[in-house]
Amino acid sequence: MTSTVFAPWEDAEAKPLIHFQNVTKRFGDFVAIDDLTIDIYEREFYALLGPSGCGKTTLMRMLAGFETPTEGTIHLAGQDIAPVPPNKRAVNMMFQSYALFPHLSVWDNIAFGLKRQNMPKHNITERVEEMLRLTRLEKFARRKPHQISGGQRQRVALARSLAKAPKLLLLDEPLGALDKKLRQETQFELMDIQEKTGTTFVIVTHDQEEAMTVASRVAVMDHGKIIQVATPDRIYETPNSVYVADFIGDVNIIEGTASANGEDQYAVTWSEGQAPLNATSTTTFAEGQKCHLAIRPEKVTINADKPEGVDNLVQGKILDIAYLGNISTYYVELPSGTVIKAQTANTRRIARRSFTWEDTVWLSWTATAGVLLAE
Amino acid sequence: MNRLSWFNVVSLTLGFAFLYIPMVILIIYSFNESKLVTVWAGFSTKWYGELLQNEAYLNAAWVTLKVAVFSSTIATVLGTMGAYVMVRGGRFFGRTLFSGMIYAPLVMPEVITGLSLLLLFIGIGLDRGVLTIVLAHTTFSMCYVSVVVSSRLVTFDRSLEEAALDLGCSPAEAFRLVTLPIIAPAVISGWLLAFTLSLDDLVIASFTSGPSATTLPIKIFSAVRLGVSPEINALSTLMIAIVTVGVISASLVSKRQAVRQQRETREAERTA
């Protein structure tokens, strides 16, 4: 059996389920969504990631029908949904506060949407029971929302929004109220349910780890604009801007000027009296153009002795050590005052560590480790 | 348990005496044999018997009850609608003015409300009777309902209504199936408040009642001007009894509900 990679966004023939065309949303003078064009494909798990106030919730509320775009159009399965009210859309939403109806039992909460579409009674019973099984809530069907735990409430909210088998499920910070352990478990549960039901999920989150874990593609937003849309690994490995590199994970940014140095090879002049840094880049930079070299701390190697035959080498003094148990991050100050973070896995016991505060160390990384960014 | 000090005992006695001695005296004299209210001549229930024969009082009681039921029901519907628009309507032109105007009748002297209603009814040529009293009571009690209901709506999670819409409800269904059941306690207490206000209103009713319809407070007030009769004592005692039974049963019901909810929660925790 050959497994094909799920990547409809690379297929020029594929029709998107959702298509935003130059959508702008203004609240008075405030521009929440700024001329945005995106495609979301069927069966995708699409994460909208960004700081609070970046417009990700507004984007989701436009899909649900609670906000209408000021300009532009939104198509769902080829149909313009601007004139369709929320109760007529094949879209369901899981609310951040869960919004469970406090006067109804778990069973009635899940059945609520089904009863609205005049489904025969035995079909409703069947569907509700299926949802209870899917979310492992069979034992709690007769309880009221205030009689179950936070994690169970979250599963009721999910079951309720999935019960009508929507074309599109919107999740607004669904795991925000759960503690870290429960959140991680639930992330895998969500992915599992998404695969089982084949529903398209759009999730809004400000937690980059959550977005990376669950999503097939991540859209990083800022000030109402999409900065980059890509798979989690590409977002992390090849960010298209300093903003994305900085927002996702930890990064060292070194400013300098680029000059060509062979095919796709650049030498970055960054500090007087220091050798230029070598970096590869597929984007072209003009001679002397300002650039930023972004390197992830785990791609920087730290050594007590000077290593031989490396692409980039700098010397510095350990300023600080952040010990996280499984990994340690070393803050190394270079003579120019720049601080570079280097991360190593603690594969040996801490007593055997070869360097400590104030030690002089060598940092090195390969030419392909970093990404050269214009802005 | 702490024993009460003599100071506590004295203050408790004084306080309750102040509150209840007038009513106790009224109840005792309602069982007085004598026609003279202030002279005790032995125990008797004859005034209760005479009261039941007195059609004027029974009529007035019936009118009062009708007026209270109708006016408080209409006031609850209108007051809830008003509160909903004020809390949910978002910003529209003149919103602050409108919400201020909803509260204004609360502080308006009753005499002025009564007089202006009287002028209105004369102006449009409406004969004064049960209908005009109902309209008048609706007018002043709907502000109370809207205050009670809007204070509940302010803390109501908006996303519950959005969730109902999202699951296929029309806005009217969302209100009926989700909003109303959740704010029901506030709506009910608004109704009860309007009902009691209407029951004991004298000022506005005396402006808007006509010869065809007299409410009990008006009847009692005008009878007392000619001297207190033992019949009125009996009538008042009956009213006290009704109110007491109402208050006690309402608190029993809510207490039982609280106990049941507590038990359910405990059970849920045990089986979780």
Image (cartoon, rainbow, N blue to C red):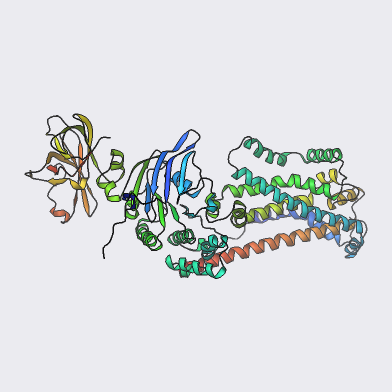
Residue placed farthest to the left in the image? A308
Q: Residue A105, position in %: x, y? A: 54, 64
* Left or right, A369 with reference to B78: left
Name the image quarter holding the N terminus of chain A: bottom left
Residue toward you, B83 or A311: A311
Q: Relative to A198, is B145 above or below? A: above
* Left or right, A191 with reference to B104: left
Q: Residue B175, position in %: x, y? A: 61, 53
Name the image quarter holding the C terminus of chain A: top left
Residue A343, visible in the rendered structure = yes
Q: Residue A371, position in %: x, y? A: 22, 41
Residue B15, visible in the rendered structure = no
Q: Relative to A30, is B203 above or below? A: below
Q: Relative to A142, is A253 above or below? A: above
* Left or right, B49 with reference to A308: right
Residue placed farthest to the front in the image? A13
Tell me the residue at 31%/43% (across/down). Answer: A247
Q: Residue A123, position in %: x, y? A: 53, 68
Tell me the residue at 75%/58% (across/down). Answer: B243
Q: Quadrant of residue B86?
A: top right
Residue toward you, A194 or B86: A194
Residue toward you, A255 or A163: A163
Tell me the residue at 20%/48% (across/down). Answer: A298
* Left or right, A178 with reference to B151: left
Residue toward you, B206 or A184: A184
